């Protein structure tokens, strides 16, 4: 029988060599080291200047080029967390071409780096039972289109209907997507870890896509109440009373959380707003001249928190939001931490909420 | 009662104005028009030259800058499909910052544009029942780590165990990820559409992460057989005989498909290899001096297809693969189409396979 060597190896090698000429070399970036330093690399023979911007840095740092065209810099001693970063190649901002992990966002392309450290963090992948994330389509009737949403189901999820799970509706920030809470915020791993420790109840977390363009934002409040909640209740074994339903969100989603929650206090027993952005027509309409029945609301809403970092660019605004609710006699628990308008803080806020809701 | 106007509007506006100075303006890109032309836009005041590369173009085209720093080009008359594209800003290749849809890949960052056309394509989001994609972790024992995989379940999936579904194991290309078959290949929508038309059987599609580095590639064959198949069979209601199990893959994954399939013909009733890359030690080991029992294999494997485009850089190599199997008297159905080593072709290959398997 004829021996099939080299199976087109020569053709293949010459094709690959052609391909190799077109593609930059495979380089490793980011390289996270055991001492919490990270080496970032970028390949370019033509660039004049390459800098690294990252939320672990106070100011951009320059990468140095070696003779092969590989630019690199090692940043020492990064506090363990997950951070967005990008390169500026001359004046062009880019995600790290060699890093698969991208910040899910509509406006920019940044990469994310996970510095795990030696002690597992609340968002770390740990050796515990894991839940699943379901990607699915639903009929967004209010908006007149088919949309995506993500649904986290907890470890050992019982789909039979024998258990009725509480549900958290969790909304991303302004130019984020329905994937940002898992891809950047690791909501699923935070839930896995806290459930494993008995610190959070097994729950379902629904992560819709909150942006509505060009339609007005109040449509998203209707979308949640009229379309998403019924869809989830028709397709998952969930408890349908308000004490088993929570809403939370970050930034624009934090503002949406206040709008959704306080126009539906009969439906949401827990309202958790993270660094809310409230300079919207909807917020103005709902809360200017607001005359709430505080006694009723304080009975309906078991827990209402507003979280923010002291370096957040919205810090002053959020303090005014908190003061407004206090003035109206609405019981609000402020959670003020250090840090800025970041997803590092989002993860902490979510971890806090998951331990507070459905108790 | 004190009136809370302006709720920190002034603080907010000044903060946002600061933020706005740091961020490029929101622009719309890509804009897909009804006549199948697409406008691509990029903002830069500093760039000297911006070009567009895309798999719908034979050669890069230049964008023109307006006085506000917005570069744009309109490409007419694109054949409806989903295409990868990128910008070159001076010499820097980037994904489109304003496009959320990124090609899931480890080596490059390209965007994808969907030109839907007037007639729904096999991968289009249509008004049919939709399945779900499950993102989950599993214990990859062979590789000694926890890995991700994606599992498509069909519309109206019955989790009770009353129905036993056939399973397709579907593997991505060399620097792709476990998300590429859904994010770029729309495997879920192709399945939804073909199932709705009665052209494909309701099935489960498992999309693992096929890259093994630095370990040798044969470990992935073991990983599929020893870890992934048992994991799926323990967690999903699936039929476990070989006539209800298929393996398919593209490029490096197409080569893996041949290795996995033909070292396990007792386990896979269907083997579908798309533009296989076979210049690997594993392929050489398995198929050099291969002396198969063709009669037995042709009984075990109900359908074996090798698909490739005539402009694929692997075309000559794939033709030799086909000739080798024919020489060994293994029944192989070649599917030769036009086009290159692209995900446009992958979608066609998968659509073809889904109509051929489990019949």
Image: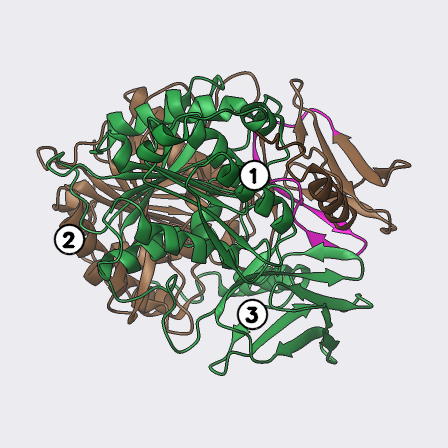
Chain colours: A green, B brown
Q: Looking at the image, is B325 positioned above or below residue A177?
A: below
Side (left or right) of A166 relative to A16: left
Q: Which residues are magenta?
A: B75-101
What's the CA distance linking mark 1 and mark 3? 30 Å
User: A352 or A50: nearer the eye?
Assistant: A352
Q: Give the structural element (helix, strand or loop) at label 3.
A: loop
- Local crowd size for mark 3, using a 10 Å CA cut-off: few (<14), some (14–19), many (≥20): many
Examine the image and state in which quarter residue A49 appears: bottom right
CA gap, disc 1 and disc 2: 55 Å
How many other residues sit within 10 Å of disc 2, few (<14), some (14-19) or many (≥20)?
some
Q: Quadrant of residue B34?
A: top right
Q: Which residue is found at the position 73% from the left and 39% from the top?
A: B10
Q: Which residue is at the front of the view, A33 or B324?
A: A33
Which secondary structure lies at badge 1? helix
How many labels, in total?
3
Please, is residue A51 above or below residue A204 in the view?
A: below
Badge 2 is on which residue?
B266
The image shows residue A261, relative to residue A67, as above or below, that is: above
Check the image and name the residue furthest to the left: B162
Dots 1, 3 in contact, CB < 8 A: no
Residue ID for mark 1: A252
- Estimate the x, y position of residue B352 in percent, counting from the top left: 37, 33
Q: Return the residue at label 3.
A: A30
> In x, y percent, where is residue A355?
31, 53
Q: Earlier in the sequence, mark 1 or mark 3?
A: 3
């Amino acid at each position: 029988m004829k021996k099939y060597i080299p199976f087109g190896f020569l053709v293949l090698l010459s094709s690959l060599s052609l391909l190799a000429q077109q593609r930059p070399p495979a380089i490793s970036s980011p390289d996270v080291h055991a001492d919490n330093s990270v080496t970032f690399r970028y390949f370019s023979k033509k660039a004049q200047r390459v800098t690294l911007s990252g939320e672990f840095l106070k100011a951009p740092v320059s990468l140095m080029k070696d003779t092969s065209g590989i630019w690199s810099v090692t940043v020492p001693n990064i506090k363990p967390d997950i951070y967005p970063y990008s390169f500026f190649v001359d004046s062009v901002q880019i995600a790290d071409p060699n890093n698969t992990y991208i910040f899910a966002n509509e406006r920019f392309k940044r990469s994310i780096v996970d510095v795990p450290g030696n002690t597992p963090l609340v968002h770390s992948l740990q050796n515990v039972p894991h839940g699943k994330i379901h990607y699915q389509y639903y009929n967004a009737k209010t908006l007149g289109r088919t949309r995506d949403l993500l649904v986290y189901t907890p470890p050992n999820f019982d789909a039979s209907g024998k258990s009725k799970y509480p549900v958290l509706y969790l909304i991303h920030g302004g130019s984020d997507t329905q994937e940002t809470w898992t891809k950047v915020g690791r909501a699923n791993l935070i839930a896995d870890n806290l459930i494993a420790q008995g610190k959070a109840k097994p729950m379902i977390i629904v992560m819709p896509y909150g942006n509505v363009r060009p339609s007005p934002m109040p449509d998203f409040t209707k979308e949640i109440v009229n379309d998403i909640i019924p869809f989830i209740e028709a397709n998952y074994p969930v408890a349908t009373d308000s004490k088993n339903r929570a809403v939370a969100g970050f930034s624009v989603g934090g503002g949406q959380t206040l709008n959704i929650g306080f126009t539906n206090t009969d439906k949401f027993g827990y309202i958790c707003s993270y660094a809310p952005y409230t300079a919207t027509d909807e917020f103005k309409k709902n809360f200017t001249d607001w005359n709430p029945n505080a006694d009723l609301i304080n009975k309906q809403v078991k827990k209402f928190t507003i979280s923010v970092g002291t370096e957040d660019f919205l810090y002053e605004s959020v303090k005014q939001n908190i003061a407004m609710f206090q003035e109206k006699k609405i019981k609000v628990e402020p959670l003020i931490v250090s840090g800025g308008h970041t997803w590092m803080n989002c993860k902490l806020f979510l971890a806090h909420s998951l331990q507070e809701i459905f108790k």
